[in-house]
Amino acid sequence: MIRDVEHEAMPREDLEALQLRRLQAVVERVYHLVPFYRRRMDEMGVKPGHIRTLEDIRLLPLTVKQDLRDNYPFGMFAAPMDQIVRLHASSGTTGKPTPVAYTQRDLETWAELMARSLAAGGAHRGDIVHVSYGYGLFTGGLGVHYGAERLGAAVIPVSGGQTRRQIMLIQDFGPTVICCTPSFALYLAEVGQEMGVDFAKTKLRVGVLGAEPWTEGMRAEIEKRLSLDALDIYGLSEILGPGVAVECLEAKAGLHMFEDHFLPEIINPTTLEPLAPGETGELVITTLTKEAFPLLRYRTRDLTSLNYAPCICGRTMARISRFQGRSDDMLIIRGVNVFPSQIESVLMETPGVAPHYQLIVDRDGQLDTLEVQVEVDEGAFSDEVKQLQALAQGIQRKIKDYFTVSVKVKLVEPQSIPRSEGKAKRVIDKRPH
Ligand code: DLL
């Protein structure tokens, strides 16, 4: 269902005209309000007036995470604190978090975009939305929460944790929509199975799942086990939180980016040159309407491609393809680039192993090594050692065939890989630093 036909199905020509007006306004705004951008643009000899077409965006500086760190905590904000009504922060893996800010109007926009996202999955007034994304500094919980309320749906703000209790609530309160990470969805399925729950008998109809990379194989598994349609949702705290792009129920083929608020580009992460539609590279986003924390050409590190082909759902907004992962997640094993999601796709098509895995990266002399630890499923666990060996070798061979990389595959007992309530930790890096 399209919530905002006027924008989501806007003729591309009109959309581009709107984007240009908004781009010019945001450039003007940051030039005058954010010293960091004024300095950068002055150094590059660029004035706001130089932006005459959408292509002129290439004249503008790129922004990277380190720029946000250098201006910690509030140096990049374009609104004074008396206009800011909310702060969130992205959890840095190392050191300090990156704070992000919203004005009242920013919160309105966010709620609207999340309402659009849920509507893209067919959610509407009268639905009950179970939110298991974490509430707190993480944008997942509150972001989805206000969007669901904006839609007129009833929200169950469960947040993460207490998995058995969540399943009881799913059975008793009858939510029709669930929002959580794909790995938590899988965990719910597993615990539900232990509890003897048949998800086909619950009212769950659709899952709006994101915040981490996942594969088509994982989608199939979640849809089967939870008996719902699983859709991919993307976002990042620096740009908004959840609600930057979402799949539509009709096509389930790429995530529509809300281009009236975000201007996407794909660049080659090494040369920084722009890439054409269809080519995979780093997603770069310029916020077109953010007041408190606008960003020009923010390098997300997320790898995807853009597709401008019309979609059967009627939206004209470009689609980004399912994410391969982040450039930071890429492993280089004996000179070959491997993404955890590529290993996942091999595991997901292998009968006998469960979709729970972890990748252990280590070093042997000068060479990086990769061990894939994957759980065997209950059925295969009772098999003979010889059969298990054959299973492990089969996976090893497939990975070698697909990605020309040699890995070690270790089958582990069911239930032995830690389960996740938020973003799954797929890679354990044991390399000495
Ligand atoms: O994860 C916001 C969010 C919450 C998105 C709930 C979707 C649902 P951060 O914690 O700042 O924000 O992490 C952002 O997570 O740059 C991607 O690397 C990754 N990510 C988010 N959604 C997806 C997705 C939230 N659908 C970072 N597929 C991003 C792959 C995703 N990666």
Image (tube, rainbow, N blue to C red):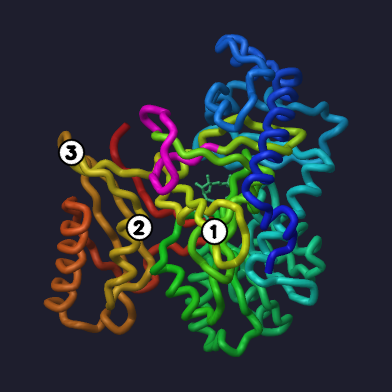
Total labels: the figure holds 3
Viewer-nearest of discs 1 and 3: 1
Query: Residue 231 location in percent, x, y?
Result: 55, 66
Q: Which mark is residue 358?
A: 2
Which residue is nearer to you in this view: 52 or 225? 52
Q: Residue furthest left?
A: 386
> Residue at 55% across / 75% down in the picture?
229
Would residue 31 appear left or right of 376 to someone viewing this image? Answer: right
> Residue at 58% across / 42% down in the picture?
91
> Residue at 27% across / 79% down in the picture?
381
Would residue 202 appear left or right of 407 to someone viewing this image? Answer: right
The residue identified by callout 1 is 310
Disc with the residue nearer the chain's start (2 vs 3): 2
Query: Residue 339 location in percent, x, y?
Result: 33, 50
Query: Residue 277 location in percent, x, y?
Result: 44, 45
Q: Kindly indicate the quadrant of the structure image that contains residue 390.
A: bottom left
Would residue 406 appear left or right of 95 to someone viewing this image? Answer: left
Mark 3 crowdedness (10 Å alpha carbons): few <14, some 14-19, many ≥20: few
Name the kind of residue labelled 1 in the image: Pro
The CA distance from mark 1 to mark 3 is 46 Å
Point out the stretch of residues depicted in magenta.
269-284
